[in-house]
Structure formats: C-alpha cells, structure tokens
Amino acid sequence: MPLFPLVRDAATAEFLDGCERGDLLVVRDRTTGAYLDPKTDVSADPERFERVAASGDATVISWSIGHGRGADGAPTRWTFGIVQLAEGPWFWSELQLPEGRAPEGLSGASAHVAFVRTGPAPEHATIPVFVVD
C-alpha cells in the first residue's frame, strides 16, 4: 500500500501513464540494445533512446523494512527494496510478500510487477510494486 497519494506532472507523465495502462516503461538504447533506468532522459537524444515496456519479471537484490504508524496510530511496516529487472536495470520499489512469508531471505527471490493506485481520487497516480513469488 503506498504511503501517500502521488499526482503525475510533466516529468513523470509518460512513465505514470504507462503504469496506468499496466506497462512498466524502461528506456532502450537503440544503438546498443541496452536497457536503461526509467529515469533516463530520452529527450537528450530521441533518435537513440526510446521508452519500451519491460517484461515485469525481476529478482530481489536487497530489501529493508520501514516502520511507521497508520492514520489510526497503529504500528505499520512496509517492505521495500531494489529489484533487478529481467532486462537489466535496477528499480526501487515496495515489495509485496505472500501472506505468512517473512522478509528474511528475500535477496535472490523472483518477483513480478503489479500496479497499485496511490489514492482514491482520479488524479492519484498508479505506480509499480513488485510481488515476491
């Protein structure tokens, strides 16, 4: 569950529009074929760089637990981490675990992308999270 609602802006529109469609967009270098971080500025050389949909498959590289309190004051925990996409780039994300699975031993686990809305209003963006298999 996202920590707060996110609203798209000009800098995030293309990526978040992809998420709304169910596409995790990364950048592909047409010259080398390499896949790059989604934050790569394709406008730097639009003939060379393009946004493409990633497969959504990933491997957990590292993880951590965030602690806080919900709106009702109850303690909450979030699992988040770094995944390596099947295409190569690393991506920071919330990690969702199967019910009953402890986060210990997540490094190396396979995961796949899912998309969640960050809030109830129509302007609240949809973002990627990774579900551990």
Image (cartoon, rainbow, N blue to C red):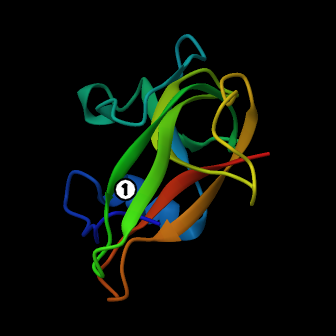
Q: Residue at x 70, y 27 (%)?
A: 105
Q: Nearer the viewer, residue 49 or 118?
A: 118
Where residue 5 sits: x, y (%)?
28, 72
Residue position for label 1: 14
Which residue lies at the image location 28% right of the left edge and 32% below the top edge?
Answer: 41
* Residue 28 visible here: no
Residue at the far bottom in the pictured view: 121
Q: Residue furthest top?
A: 32
Q: Position of residue 94 (x, y in %)?
A: 49, 49
Q: Is residue 58 left or right of residue 17?
A: right
User: In the image, what residue type sits under mark 1?
Assistant: Glu
Q: Which residue is found at the position 34% from the left and 88% from the top?
A: 122
Q: Is residue 56 left or right of residue 120?
A: right
Image quadrant where one finds the C terminus: top right
What residue occupies the far front of the structure in this picture? 74
The answer to whether 133 is drawn above or below residue 1 in the figure is above
Label 1 residue SS: helix
Where is residue 39, by image quadrant? top left
